[in-house]
Amino acid sequence: MRKSVIFLFVIFLCSSAVAAKPKIAVMDIHDRSNKMSKELLENATEMIRGKLSATGQFMVIDRSSQQEKMKQMIGKEKKESYNQNYDKESQIPLGRALAADSILRSTISCLGNDCMLSAEIVDIAREVSTKGGTSKFIFDKSDLSSLIAAIEDVVEQMADMSKGELSSKPFPQDPGNDVFVDPNASFKIIFDASDQAEVYVDGARVCKSTPCQQYVGGGMHQVKMVSRKMAPQEESIKFYRDERIIFNFAPAGAGVTITPVTVKGRTITDVSVYNGRNVIGTLPGTLFLTPDNNKIVLKRAGFQDHKMKVNVTGNFDLNLSPIMEFEKYRPYKGGAIAGFVVGGILFVAGGIGYLVAETMDALGEDADTAFIASYSLLGIGVGGIVLGAVLISIKRPVPGAEGFTFDVSGNGAKVSYTYKF
C-alpha cells in the first residue's frame, strides 16, 4: 500500500512538472530580405526548434505534427498556403488547432549583409508577446557560423539564460586563477565585438566574422580579434564555463609626434593644426590620428600653410619633421578690399546719378551739373576698383622671427635669443 502511494506521488510530481512547461509551436522564419533559400530557412527553423527543446523549459511541438495540422487547416479554410502567412492572425489559429499555449514567431531583417534575427513568444490566449530576443549576424553563404550563433543567442534570451549560465556544470562565480578547469572539458563560446572582426584563439583563426560560436577547451587561451578599421584587440582569457565574449574596439590609429622646422632645421613653435575647419592641436607636439582622419593643415603667421596626409597603418608611433616655407611676401589685402568696396559704392552712386541726370534732361531741366557729378562718381568708382586690383597684385615683404630658449648650465640658468628668418 505504501509503495503504491509513493508511486502515485512520483507520477503526480512528474505530471505536474510536465504540465508546468508551456506547449509551444515554432513557426517558420520570415526572411524579409529574401536573401535566404527556402531550404536554409527550414533548417534554421528546425535548429530553433531543437535548441528551444534542449533548454528543458518548453514542450515543443514536432514539425511533422505541425505540418499535418497545417495541411488540414489549408484544406478546411481553402487557403493557398499557411507557409506564406506570417502575421499573427494566420499563425494563432494554427497554434490553437495544435492545442499550443504559445507560438514562436521569428523574423530576419537585413541591411546589406548586416542582419538581425528577431523572435518573440506570443501567448495564444491573451494574444500578447511574453518573451523575445534579438541578435545580429553577418550573412555569408559560405560561412553560416554567424547565423548559428545568432540562433543560439536568441534562444538563450528567450529561455532567460544569462552569461555564464549555459554550462550544465556548476562553477564558482569568480573566474580567478584559483578556479580549477578540466583541460579535457570543452565550452561553448560566442565571440562578438563592437565591429565585424576575425577571431583568433592561440594564433589560429576560428571565425571569419563576428558574431560566431566555437567550442574552446578549458583553461587559459590567448584571444585576438582583428577588424579592418579598428585597432586589434588581444586578451588572455580563462575559459571555465559557456559564455559570451564581447570585445569593444577602439579606433585604429597612432600617436604622431610632429615638429615643424624651417629649411635650415630651426624648430617652429605655436603652429596650429587643422582638420577641416577644426583645430585639433598645436605643434610641436603629439597628435592621435586614424586612417580615416589623417589629413591635416599646419598654419602659423608668417609661414605658408603646409598640407599633410599622414600614412597611419597601425598602432605605431611616428615622428615627423615637416618643413614649412616662410611666407616672404604678403599682399596689401586691407587696401585692396577698401578699394573694391569704396570704388564699387561710388560706381553705383555714379550710375544712379547718371539716371537722375537723364531724367532731368528729359523734363527740360538743367542737368549739366548732375551729369558732371555722375561722371565724376563713375570715374572715381572705376579708379577705386582699379586701385584694389593693383594693391592685391603688389606684395610687400613680411619680416619673420622666432624666439628660442636654452638651458646653459646645470643649475637651470637659461638664455634666450631671437632668430631672424
Image (spheres, helix red, strand yellow):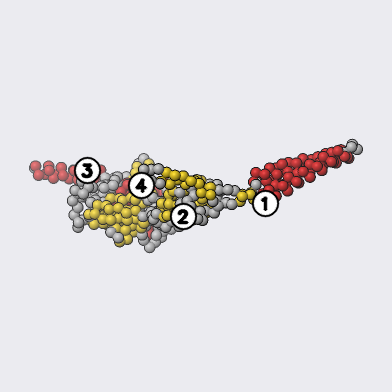
Image coordinates of residue 123 in percent, x first then y, are 35, 43
In whole angstroms, how far apart are the C-alphas of marks 3 and 2?
79 Å
- The residue drawn where x is 64% and y is 50% is 395
Q: Which kind of residue does numbered mark 3 sit on?
A: Ser
Other-residue count near label 4 (Cα within 10 Å), few / some / many at <14 / 14–19 / ≥20: many
- Taking the spot 32% from the left edge, 56% from the top edge, the residue there is 224
Which numbered disc flags the more N-terminal residue, 1 or 3? 3
* Location of residue 230 in the rendering, given as x and y in whole percent from the top left corner: 40, 53
Disc 3 + disc 4, Cβ < 8 Å: no
Query: Is residue 169 left or right of 52 when viewed as pictured?
Result: left
Q: Quadrant of the N terminus?
A: top left
- Residue at 45%, 57% in the rendered image: 311
The residue wearing badge 1 is 393
**Compared to 316, does 345 lie above or below?**
above
> In front: mark 1 or mark 3?
1
Question: Mark 2 packing: few (<14 Cα in 10 Å), some, or many (20+)?
Answer: some
Residue bearing mark 4: 133
Residue under label 2:
321
The residue beneath circle 3 is 16
Of all residues, the one furthest to the top in this rendering is 365
Q: Residue furthest right?
A: 364
Describe the element under mark 2 as helix, strand or loop: loop
